[in-house]
Image (cartoon, grey):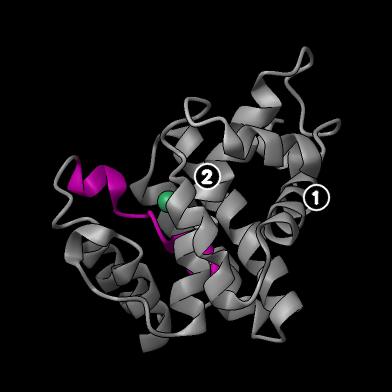
Amino acid sequence: MTRDDVLDSIQANVENENLINHMLATEAIMRALARRLGQDEEEWGLTGLLHDIDVELTEDDMHSHSQLGADIAQELGATGEMAQAILCHNEAHGIHCETLLDKALFCADPLTGLIVAAALVRPNKKLAGVTAKSVMKRFGEKRFAAGANREQIAKCSEIGLELEEFIALGLEAMQGIADELGL
Ligand SMILES: [Fe+2]
């Protein structure tokens, strides 16, 4: 499975630009986490890129979401570990995150939304001037980007990262693809 195969499949299954950007941002964070933790960057990156591929197909059915995604990923040639991480990133299935990859995707997913929101409240709406310190502050403001589940983000402790480091790593990763994200 190549990154191009995954991007083709995303083009075929996802229309919403924001959702595509969310998957690209998750990929960037997962790649940075893989480098930080000495894991397979391609495997982790593609897991992040694929993880919400079924959102439009499953609409609001949270019990199908990520089950179908895991199936699509496997059809594309994802490993069983990748499919499992995609499956358990959706808490509705009640499947506990076991592997480092499962846990990394679980905490990376909501971090993208918090960082995007931190960029969008700036006058220029760009990621360039956002600092890790400002995102940390936003993290503590419960009503700011309330959809970005803080408890889930804080699970970075389970992959051995302090919250500050995780936020800084995620921010830097997203800043690295800011043009692609239109931010
Ligand atoms: Fe997601």
Kind of residue at disc 1? Gly
- By secondary structure, the bulk of the magenta-drawn segment is best described as helix
- Residue at image position (67%, 18%) is 121
Kind of residue at disc 2? His
Tell me the residue that label 2 is attached to: 22
**Residue 136, quarter of picture:** top right
Q: Which stretch did the figure color magenta?
A: 46-59
Q: Residues within 10 Å of mark 2 (few under 14, many from 20)?
A: many
- CA distance for labels 2 and 1: 14 Å
Quadrant (top left, top right, bottom left, bottom right) of the C terminus = top right
Q: Nearer the viewer, residue 179 or 31?
A: 31
Q: What is the x, y in percent for residue 173?
A: 75, 54
Q: What is the x, y in percent for residue 86?
A: 36, 69
**Disc 1 secondary structure class:** loop
Q: Nearer the viewer, residue 157 or 50?
A: 157
Q: Is residue 178 left or right of residue 44?
A: right
**Disc 2 secondary structure class:** helix
Q: What is the x, y in percent for residue 122?
A: 74, 18
Q: Nearer the viewer, residue 13 or 175?
A: 175
Disc nearer the start of the sequence (2/1): 2
- Residue at image position (80%, 50%) is 176
**Residue 81, quarter of picture:** bottom left
Q: Nearer the viewer, residue 155 or 86?
A: 155
Q: Is residue 48 left or right of residue 124?
A: left
Tell me the residue that label 1 is attached to: 176
| Residue 114 in view in this figure | yes
Q: Is mark 2 within 8 Å of ligand 1?
A: yes
- Residue at image position (66%, 38%) is 181
